[in-house]
Image (cartoon, rainbow, N blue to C red):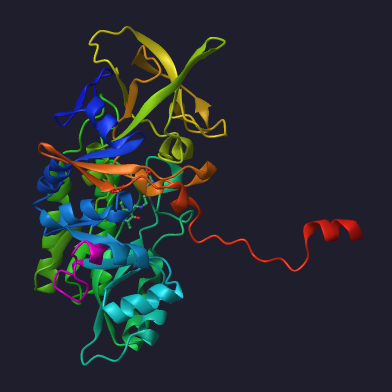
Amino acid sequence: MTPLLHDIAGHSIRELGQQFGTPFYAYDAATIAERIAELAAFDVVRYAQKACSNLAILDLVRRHGAMVDAVSAGEIHRAMAAGFQPGFHDPPEIVFTADLFDRETLDRVVELEVPVNCGSPDMIDQYGERAPGHSKPLPITLRINPGFGHGHSQKVNTGGEQSKHGIWHEQVNDCIERAAKHNLTISGLHMHIGSGSDLEHLSQVCTAMEQTAMAIGASLTSISTGGGLPTPYRNEDQRIDIQPFFDLWDATRRRLEAAFGHPVSLEVEPGRYLSAESGYLISEVRAVKRMGSNLYYLVDAGFNNLARPVMYGAYHPMAVCPAKGETDRSLQEVIVGGPLCESGDIFTQTEGGVVSSQTLPEAQVGDYVVIGCAGAYGFAMSSNYNSKPMCAEVLLDGDTAHLIREHQTMEDLIRGETIPHLTRRTDEATDEA
Ligand code: LLP
């Protein structure tokens, strides 16, 4: 992304800003389609919808042949609303992955026949006890923690003893017994070691997968690499080369096929790889101020809209779009922050909350600041903190910009809240005291 930017996917940022009102997310549909196509060698691309679960995005990935992962009853509901069918299909269109069942979700997956990927031994027992008797064993898959992990931040490393995720790799035999007791068959294995990892760490998972798969044996008909494929957030970051990643996994799969004597399907489960680069958070500059030696652009989006910088010290590329369309502006070092009443509301920060800066064009009130690579874990992690309404989302599809989520209204903000009729008035209580 260049620091002075006028268009996104052929759409004028100024026109989008005027039409939809800032702040809003814009997603370029073509980027998501391209990323899915890059993974076509895998038998199944299963989108980890937690990254960006707007119905229009789910519909888009479905139309491009991807399946979906769900981590809550809400995500199952979204998947179905976007046209994915629940059920034990081969491959299943929706899979539920978690480390626990809350009671409602256990009821839902049983009722809807959504296959489950169990991340704790207790899930096997609870599912086995709750699932009605079938003429043949019901399939489940296991999410294994291979004892090591890796991610862009310790908060998203999902392997090793410090992580709550998955079934510990040494507990596989116990899980085989639990499954047999409940007439469940272990049809698949899954390992997701963390998010924003790298090829080296992701490749180490193949060996761990093969060992665990051999311990389980020929009931296995699918293996999943999990997600975690990195995204180039910085200009200098290289995009991961999918071919060597696929080749390693394909070789693992082929060895398992030879050992079991039947086909084994190979799944990949990316979240950010599909949606991160497609998304932009577009905000308006509302104040420009100097604080000692620091220059701040304060924009109308905050960590209520994009939490990755404050949560992980994550870097997002930024650009300025001048409201009047100028093409020449000098560059300067700036800190970009939002409207929230909290000093951590800074988009230019590194891990641990250290305030940093970016080199951006001069800007004035009314110009736009565009935050790039924001399509994964952007809107999906947004909140109503400071009673800020959640922002709109727009899908750019060729020449058309579709509003795919409206800005929340003030009424939306207080929906569901009630003021109870108190038995004692506060002033009475004060009188007695
Ligand atoms: N599969 C499983 C089981 C997962 O837990 C996750 C992410 C994924 C796939 C997709 O990971 P991805 O391909 O997107 O890296 N909020 C953090 C990321 C948390 C990811 C949680 N699980 C962030 O903004 O970086």
Residue closest to the eye, 413 or 181:
413
Identify whether 356 is placed above or below 97.
above
| Residue 335 x %, y % | 45, 20
> Main structural element of the magenta stretch: helix, strand or loop?
loop
Q: Is residue 283 visible?
A: yes
Tell me where the magenta segment starts and ends, as one range. 79-93
Q: Nearer the viewer, residue 299 or 306?
A: 299
Quarter location, residue 128: bottom left
Q: Position of residue 111 (x, y in %)?
A: 31, 81
Give how far across and how far down residue 31 sits, in percent: 16, 40
Queried whether the magenta region covers residue 398, the answer comes back as: no
Residue 87 counted in the magenta span: yes
For residue 224, which quarter of the picture? bottom left
Residues 427 and 298: in front is: 427
Where does the C terminus fall, quadrant-wise? Answer: bottom right
Inspect this view and state whether residue 72 appears. no
Question: Which quadrant is home to the N terminus?
Answer: top left
| Vertical placement of residue 354 versus 106, above or below | above
310 or 118: nearer the viewer: 310
Q: Which residue is drawn at the image coordinates 38% and 52% (left, top)?
A: 148
Residue drawn at x 9%, y 67% as measured from the top left: 258
